[in-house]
Amino acid sequence: MARQTFKIEGLAELDTALTELPKATARNVLARVLKEQGAPIRDAGEQLAPRLKGGLKASYTMGTKLSKRQKSMNRKESMVELYIGPGPAAKGVQTEFGNAHQAAQPHLRPAFDGNVMKVLAGIRDSLANEIEKARARLAKKAEREAAKMAAGK
């Protein structure tokens, strides 16, 4: 499978801001943003999936976990990764790429190509907002803890 590269302005500053947050908070912020912004690709893929027997359309999912087989074929490259597509059954791959008995009926690739730039821009904008919200939550938490310490609890 060919690897694509995209250039987005402003992510270096956001990456720096993420490193200032605690690791768990940064991971949660990234997961929230990716799930929110990945929805258009999932929805478009689900909509474009051929409606045949077998439930391909209903198997579309978005999550951070892979099946054992998928995990063995994938190398983790980031702290948070979101996977979008049909479930682990072979029918998704067979339908997308075809085989000796069936012509290809791409559904995920057109969904990705049609939404990728919108999703990447949304990630940039949404990530900035989520980082600010996380900073505000951490500041409130620090205030509460300082008040507790001052009260002697």
Image: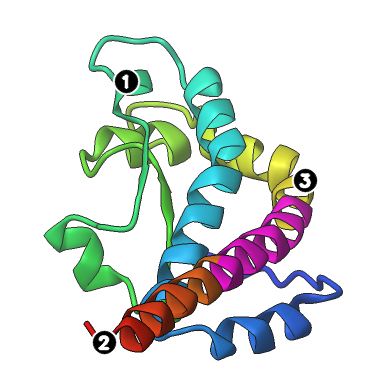
Secondary structure under tag 3 reads helix
Magenta segment boundaries in residue numbering:
121-136
User: Callout 2: 10 Å neighbours few (<14), some, many (20+)?
Assistant: few
In the foreground, 12 or 108: 12
Q: Which mark is residue 47?
A: none
Image coordinates for residue 136, horizontal then vertical, percent: 59, 67
In this rendering, the label closer to the viewer, 1 or 2: 2
CB-based contact (under 8 Å), mark 3 and mark 2: no
Q: Is residue 78 left or right of residue 11?
A: left
Q: Which amino acid lies under the numbered mark 3 shown in the image of this protein?
A: Lys
User: Callout 1: 10 Å neighbours few (<14), some, many (20+)?
Assistant: few
Q: Which amino acid lies under the numbered mark 1 shown in the image of this protein?
A: Ala
Image coordinates for residue 134, horizontal then vertical, percent: 55, 67
Image coordinates for residue 126, horizontal then vertical, percent: 69, 55
Q: Is residue 130 above or below residue 114?
A: below
Q: Which mark is residue 58?
A: 1
Residue with the mark numbered 2: 152
- Mark closer to the chain start, 3 or 1: 1
Residue with the mark numbered 3: 118
Residue 8, quarter of picture: bottom right
Residue 76 falls inside the magenta stretch: no
